[in-house]
Amino acid sequence: MNETLINQVLSLLDAHETDEGVLMQLNIFGEEGRNLLLDIAWGKVKGATPSQRGRAVYILCLFEWQPVLEHISKFLRNGEPTVRLHTIYGLRFLGGDFAIQQLLDLLEDQTCSEIEKAHALRVLGNIGDAKTAKKIEDWLDKVESLQLKMAANQAIDVLRRRRLVSTESNDTIQN
């Protein structure tokens, strides 16, 4: 692969914020650039840091690049916490049933840390629907961790504010 392109992409992944300029520059590289981002995410590019790997996944999700979908569940269980967290937040851009199910599955994963589950709940509150709220409520009954109970209740509260859950009860009011 083109060493200049690799260095440019790695440099862009080090930007403090993923702003419009960074996204525009990465998008200019087209399919070759997106494939490079996937290679970076998988650790196939020598010298890529965990932070760059995580940001690569995040940006692929932000671009809603369909080929990344087949890799999401593996990125969520990657050995690097940074990659896992960037994937969790990247799912916010993919949205829909696929992203919701990936995050709900993560809540049931015994190998997933409480912190990651709390972040997954935050994203579920942002992209979920009434069915998601019900699943979070059902999951909440099995949770012992105070931190996770608080995160789950915050997610449900966000769904309430989005008018997806009744404020009088825990019953859902829309699909």
Image: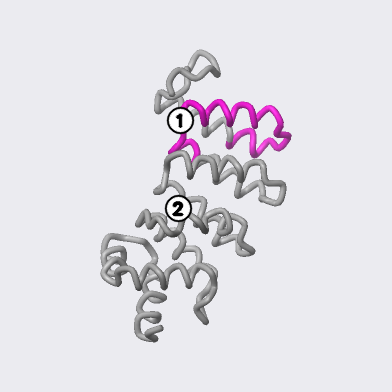
Q: Residue at x 41, y 73 (%)?
A: 36
Q: Secondary structure at mark 1?
A: loop
- Left-right relation of 9 to 114: left
- Mark 1 sits on what residue? 129
- Mark 2 sits on what residue? 90
Q: Nearer the viewer, residue 21 or 63?
A: 63
Please state the horizontal and vertical placement of residue 130, each as a whole percent of the image: 47, 26
What is the quadrant of residue 58 in the picture? bottom left
Q: Nearer the viewer, residue 40 or 67?
A: 67
Give the vertical position of 4 relative to 130 (above or below): below
Give the vertical position of 170 relative to 26 (above or below): above
Q: Magenta segment: does it hold 140?
A: yes
Task: Name the main secondary structure of what is drawn in magenta.
Answer: helix
Q: Secondary structure at mark 2?
A: helix
Q: Residue at x 50, y 63 (%)?
A: 54
What segment carries the magenta color?
123-151
